[in-house]
Image (cartoon, grey):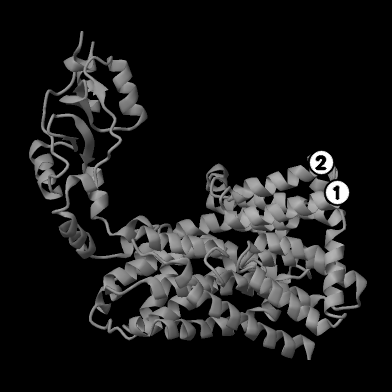
Amino acid sequence: MKIKEVMIPDLTSVSADTPIKEAVKVMSRQRMVGLPVVDNDQNVIGIITESDIAKACLPGYYKELQNPSFIPDFDQFSQQAKKIAHFPVKEFMTREVFTVEENTSRTEAANLLFRKQLRIVPVVRAGKLVGILTPSCLCKHAMEED
Amino acid sequence: MSQTLIALIIFITTLIFVSLEKINRTVIALSGGLLFILLKILNQNEAFLAIDLNTIGLLTGMMVMVSIIKRTGLFQYLAIKISKLAHGNIFYLLFFLSIITGILSSILDNVTTIILIVPITLAICENLEISSIPLVLSEIFAANIGGTATLIGDPPNIIIGSAAHLSFMDFIVNLAPFVLILLILLPFFVRLFYKKEMSQNIKEAWGRVEKFDERKAIEDPMLLKKSILVFLLTISIFIFHHNLGLEAATVALAGATLLLLVSNIDPAETFLEVEWSTLFFFIGLFVVIAGVEKVGIIQWLSNKIITLTKGNFTLTTLVVLWVSGITCSFINNISYTISMVPVIHNIGAVTSFNLNPVWWALSLGACLGGNGTFIAAAANLVGVNILKRQGRIITFKEFFRIGLPIMLISIILSSIYLFLKYLL
């Protein structure tokens, strides 16, 4: 079985210049953990995930602290989130994105997803977005097949 | 080519490459050491015997203990607690953070101290909306100064203590009081360079820092209790280790083993945090210096120092202090100290000097020299890099502008201290 039979044929994506705030809205509306970033020709040029955005919202020193739980309020997080809300997606997206071709086998795709611990992978045909693949797609099909 | 010339070339190349940090320093030191064996200047047995296992054991024991205590959150707790004493005064904040950094650095290695303290400082500064640069720089200087106070505070002291059979208490008695004075003076000096930043009013924003809950920094209260007990026990044994006939490495390794035993932490997990790279850096350097010593370069250097100072003890001590301070502003102080140990032993062998003041001069010079430039000590590079990740760039020139005067003043004060205490 090929990935094109397993993937979600959802073409939801954003452009590199989409503001982060918009990307967050789309993710939330579509209940997606990440969005492929595409150019005008629908070529996948990156991916922006919830985790990329959450990291960008953290003040820089959070990443340096052993344990930030002594900081009682949400102020710094809110301030940083407001600051980056209008920044374009390209500032925080992952450029070296893992994609799978629609004709890739399930084994190969599963290997990529589980080895790299990816929660979402764009599925492409000659570099152009045709859908997305998540670990649950693979599990669901595996459980349902005869 | 004579063996002496080959040895000299390997030695100087090793020192230069270690200081340039273009290639990993451990690889350089191991390559230098191996070359001495491959070129048959040393045989394998001589090379192995040259490795000071007391130094390696002490470093390993302390690394294991610190890696466990670090998990408890104790150091973050202390940093937040003491910062609150500033009560909205920016200079007090600088003062207390520098002092706690210096004190922690006297029991932890300087890099660990900086990694623990600087992020807390950044959190405080961001909440107060002030520049973190004066505070972080002061902490870097304090870490280098504080490390000078004890046997376990800075690698040069570990090397000196082991080579000269100086005990933990010898360092406390001879260096700690003077280092404390330097630590207290430091914030006043840093203030001179950052008058504008130090005149900012932080009273209004201070409430945000007051809200920091230091108790939440404690991650494992049970481990904290056990760690404090074992650490205090270890320090107590350090105080008497010479009277008990125990070497420093035995005490540190015993402390580490006891802490592993009572904490029930998987040793494999802890050993991952031991800086094996640093330990092998030491091992490589010990072999390099043994090679240089064998061909007679060290003896030649010691004789040269005695001739230059005309056998004058005061002058020899002060020359060791100043040469160490200035040299260690540019080259790695571990490689410098390992090189100087046999030189000083040789000076002792051909003169009737009581070498102790010379060892203190070496310790003060090698440790305090670390403040001269930002390439001089690992703590400087780590601190500057943390700031860089926050988008705050400290150039070589800016560090040098403050670091060099701090280094020079501390060496001048050390000269006065050594002169009054030992040479008068």
Image vertical order of residue B95 relative to residue B245, above or below: below
Tag 1: residue type? Gln
Quarter of the image for residue B38 reads top right
Instruction: Say which chain tag 1 marks.
Output: B
Q: Would residue A67 be found to the left or right of residue A52 on screen?
A: right
Q: Look at 9% across and 41% down and name the residue there.
A: A26
Tag 2: residue type? Leu
Q: Residues within 10 Å of mark 2 (few under 14, many from 20)?
A: few
Q: Would residue A99 be found to the left or right of residue B183 on screen?
A: left
Quarter of the image for residue B255 reads bottom right
Does residue B140 show up?
yes
The percent coordinates of residue B209 (x first, y second) are 30, 74
Judging by the rendered image, the residue that carries numbered circle 2 is B39
Are the two marked residues, 1 and 2, in contact with CB atoms closer than 8 angstroms?
yes
Task: Tell me which label, 1 or 2, sits earlier in the chain.
Answer: 1
> Which label sits in the foreground, 1 or 2?
1
Q: Secondary structure at mark 1?
A: helix
Which residue ends up furthest to the left in the rendered image?
Answer: A29
Q: Look at 61% across and 74% down and name the residue there.
A: B368
Quarter of the image for residue B272 reads top right
The percent coordinates of residue B242 (x first, y second) are 78, 69
Q: Secondary structure at mark 2?
A: loop
**Image label count:** 2
Q: Look at 57% across and 46% down and name the residue there.
A: B271
Residue A32: mark: none
Judging by the rendered image, the residue that carries numbered circle 1 is B3
Instruction: Say which chain tag 2 marks.
Output: B
